[in-house]
Image (cartoon, rainbow, N blue to C red):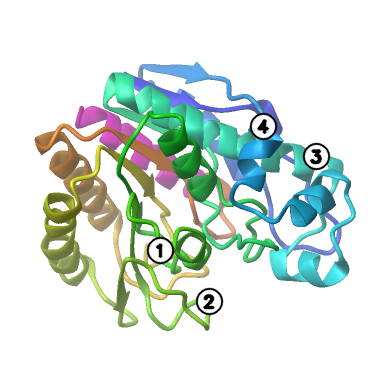
Amino acid sequence: MLHVVHHPAYVSPATPGSAYRFDKYGLVMDALTESGTAMTVHTPEVMPREWIEAVHDPAYVDEVISLSVPPEKMRRIGFPITDRVATRSLLSPGGTWAAARLAKIHGYAANAAGGSHHALHDTGAGYCVFNDLAIAANRLIVEGDAKHILILDLDVHQGDGTAALMAGRTDVFTLSIHAERNFPVRKARSSLDIGLEDGIDDHGYMAVLTYALPRVLDDFAPDLILYQAGVDPHGEDRLGRLELTDAGLNARDRFVLRQARKRTIPVASTMGGGYGANRMLIARRHADCMIRMAQEM
């Protein structure tokens, strides 16, 4: 049974002047339904403002909520902050937090949004407004739902915002495996960064993952994994620089879940990146990711 967190407000109309589209967050639910996968859909609540401000600058949080984000920050984010965008930006961290709590019960759960790993303390960036991974991790630890959290970021882009926001913490380990020459140009320092050369294939990618992940799990011993499961390492992705196939993404996700299950560590996934003109194809990649991870439990 797949437990997935979704809210209709995850889907926002396209914003003027931006190429970014929010439709995949609805299309992924269509893809899950079309697959016939047994699933339970859970509705998230808005993340309370105090938990967002525990990670982000309160002045920036106010800019988002009051729809007064300065133009230079909107350019860095990649789209204007409308009322609908602000609402989904408050819901997405609530969805990641809810997925983590569901994972503690069921072993695995997915947020059908989230993975906004570029958002920094006082600004958003790279299509990310608030960093749901950092916000959820902090709240889960403060409220006693976890003691040590691994934020595993396998998006094609480095999780620079997450790395910066969680820097210096001994209760959160950030592991980012990404394309070294891809965005962002200026990388942050995760607990462990592995930058990959352009064009790495399934075999090369899995060699890195199978070497690094078990060692981090054994050394850090997390009791929860927040998994940024972006599908943009795929060779056909518009913004990727790697050459994974569908089989490679399948091997990646199943390895993560099997390693977690072996150590009885619950996993909550977020969607992260996936870009291309065929929006339904991208949505199916995200849906397939959730389906195969649920199958591993």
Q: Choose the circle earlier in sequence order: 4 or 3.
A: 4
Q: Amino acid at mark 4?
A: Pro
Alpha carbon distance from label 4 to label 1:
25 Å
Q: Is residue 49 left or right of residue 55?
A: right
Alpha carbon distance from label 4 to label 3:
17 Å
Alpha carbon distance from label 2 to label 1:
21 Å
Q: Which residues are magenta?
A: 281-297
The kind of secondary structure element at disc 4 is loop
Relative vertical location of residue 226 with respect to residue 116 in this rendering, above or below: above
Q: Amino acid at mark 1?
A: Gly
Location of mark 3 (residue): 84
Q: Choose the circle earlier in sequence order: 1 or 3.
A: 3
The kind of secondary structure element at disc 2 is loop
Relative vertical location of residue 144 with respect to residue 179 in this rendering, above or below: above
Q: Choose the circle earlier in sequence order: 2 or 1.
A: 1
| Residue 161 spot, x, y in % from top left | 53, 63
**Pointer 3 with pointer 2, Cβ within 8 A:** no
Which mark, by number, is residue 168?
1
Q: Is residue 5 left or right of residue 218?
A: right
Q: Amino acid at mark 3?
A: Arg
The kind of secondary structure element at disc 1 is loop
Q: Choose the circle earlier in sequence order: 4 or 1.
A: 4
Magenta portion: prevailing SS class: helix
